[in-house]
Image: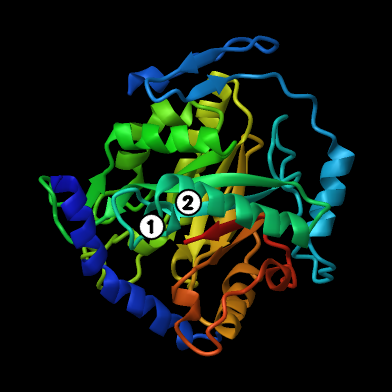
Amino acid sequence: MKLKNIIFSATFLLLPLILFTNCSQSSSSAKDAVKTTAKPTGTTTTTTTETDTTVSHVTYPPLNKKLYDSLMKKLAHGDTTGKWPVKNAPYPLPGAILPFKRVVAYYGNLYSKKMGILGELPPNEMLARLHQAVQEWQKADPSTPVQPALHYIAVVASGDPGKDGKYRHRMPFKQIDTVLYLAKKAHAIVFLDIQVSLSNIRAELPLLEKYIEMPQVHIGIDPEFSMKDGTLPGRKIGTFDAADINYVSDYLANVVRKYNLPPKIFIVHRFTRKMVTNYKEIKLHKEIQFVMNMDGWGEPDLKTGTYRNFIYPEPVQFTGFKLFYKNDIKKAPHHMLTPQEVLKYKPYPIYIQYQ
């Protein structure tokens, strides 16, 4: 398959960026069938695709604000600086996942065994391992239920320019349908991740709306592959500004209101300061739940420093933490952080991603 070969090629061409990522951290201080139509509150709509992905719209009870506040305070993990929990953040709409559950996600692309655990293993084996990871997190923090997730790269930065010269490839909807089917088997939610490369988020996000309309589908964007100056992906680390992030937040909020959905979780990956600029201008909405996800790989001390220097001091709403089954153990002490070790961080990450 031509597209599959392109993705494999892109993986190898982006290896220099993976190495650059590690070096940069070391130098720092550490089909239409799936489309659903929402009904008024109190009704349920079910749509089944050819891959047997079933979508149900349900009515959620009102938000328990007292419980929400107590859980947000718990996530702050004793922070006394006033940064956490974030002040003046809006309460979410009913049906919010965070902070009531911790999301544990497997990340990757079905065309590539080198882009993450999601595509590295046969599907049933992958889902079994995801279940094991969920159980490990549940054991580490019994007070917080765990929500499994599949985090799928739907737009992939590539070393191949493609027909339009944007150096990104949009995955076929049939593959997204497959991910939805696998997620259903695992009682998992789905994240669709976007690497814009030489394109831009305003061109890419609307193409996924028929999936965003589904209540179990959420969104992630990756500044690492947003090449605003025209540099090819793999040559340097890219960036998103608050204006780009606010566009996505506004778009998601509009979809939530239009289709009467529960809040969308919105993931932004980060491991350097310049990957996200003007963070204080990022706007929050009751229709979205914003997660700044620590995306760097390396030895435990390096990851700790990255979280401390680029996630903790620039609070937006929630935090996430990424773990790499292979890259995190390349250097001494050849150890990937355990759930218990990650739970020592301040604030507690509420979104966990495995690649």
Left/right placement of residue 28 relative to residue 225 reads right
The total of numbered circles placed on residues is: 2
Look at the picture and state if 274 lies above or below 5.
Answer: below
Of 174 and 293, the residue lying toward us: 174
Give me the disc on residue 185. Answer: none
Left/right placement of residue 146 relative to residue 326 reads right
Q: Residue at x 39, y 50 (%)?
A: 122
Q: Report x, y in % for residue 246.
A: 50, 46
Q: Residue at x 65, y 71 (%)?
A: 338
Q: Report x, y in % for residue 239.
A: 39, 63
Q: Residue at x 29, y 60 (%)?
A: 228
The amino acid type found where label 1 is placed reads Glu
Q: Are marks 2 and 1 in contact (CB under 8 Å)?
A: yes
Q: Report x, y in % for residue 250.
A: 51, 37
Give me the disc on residue 126. Answer: 2
Cα separation between marks 2 and 1: 8 Å
Look at the numbered disc 1 and give the secondary structure of its residue: helix
User: Which residue does the numbered mark 1 point to in the structure image?
Assistant: 120
Q: Is residue 243 visible?
A: no
Look at the numbered disc 2 and give the secondary structure of its residue: helix
